[in-house]
Amino acid sequence: MQHSHSVAESALNCRAVEKEDIETLLSLLVYFYGIHAQQAINYLDLGNVKFCYSRSTGRLRSIVQGSEELAFIRPSDFRLIPRLSMAIILQKVLPYPKSRVVVVNEIVDDILEGHTVFSKHVIGGDPTIRPGDEVLIVNEEDKLIGVGRALIGFEAMITAFMGPAVQIREKVRKDEKKGI
């Protein structure tokens, strides 16, 4: 499901960030990605960031910078779901291998063509990953391939010989691979 700024603007009530919004974002980042994730705020142009709230519930739904959605909030569990632009920032601030699933280099092109990372292609990553976690998908050199949702825990990813490991939510475009 692609979110866009214009859709967010029309379906949601968006406004410039205020001090309490920044505190909310920091809390979400730390809760889901650990203490290092709070450094992500340093990579944002806060003067150009908007928080978008549901018109019906008043709850936070999306974080937008300029015309690009950085992350959205899943209504069912208030989980911060990073878009590719936020994943790039998280990769910069999170120490390796935090929140990462590492796949073999030989399969990167196939992953970019598909929608799933299979267990047999996972060679490393964050041992604390649980099913349902949002993860960064990287190659052996820690180059970002995409972002997705872990379908199984890390231990199962590493030991399984078959089956899906990560449902890809968004991936770098092939023309943006930049050294992958």
Image (tube, rainbow, N blue to C red):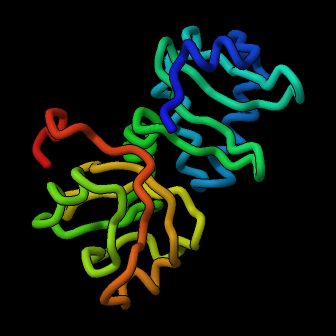
User: As drawn, which residue projects farthest toward the right?
Assistant: 57
Residue 33 image offset from top left, x and y in percent: 57, 54
40 relative position to 79: left or right? left
Quadrant for residue 121, please give it: bottom left
68 relative position to 80: left or right? left
Question: 73 or 112: nearer the eye?
Answer: 112
Quadrant for residue 14, please give it: top right
144 relative position to 99: left or right? left
Residue at horizontal 44 percent and vertical 61 percent from the top: 167
57 relative position to 99: left or right? right
Q: Is residue 63 above or below residue 84?
A: above
Residue 163 image offset from top left, x and y in percent: 38, 81
Residue 128 image offset from top left, x and y in percent: 53, 74
Q: Is residue 72 above or below residue 44?
A: below
Q: Is residue 55 above or below residue 15?
A: below
Residue at horizontal 69 percent and vertical 49 percent from the top: 79
What number of labels is visible?
0
Residue 157 image offset from top left, x and y in percent: 40, 80
Question: 60 or 151: nearer the eye?
Answer: 151
Residue at horizontal 63 percent and vertical 54 percent from the top: 32
Residue at horizontal 52 percent and vertical 78 percent from the top: 153
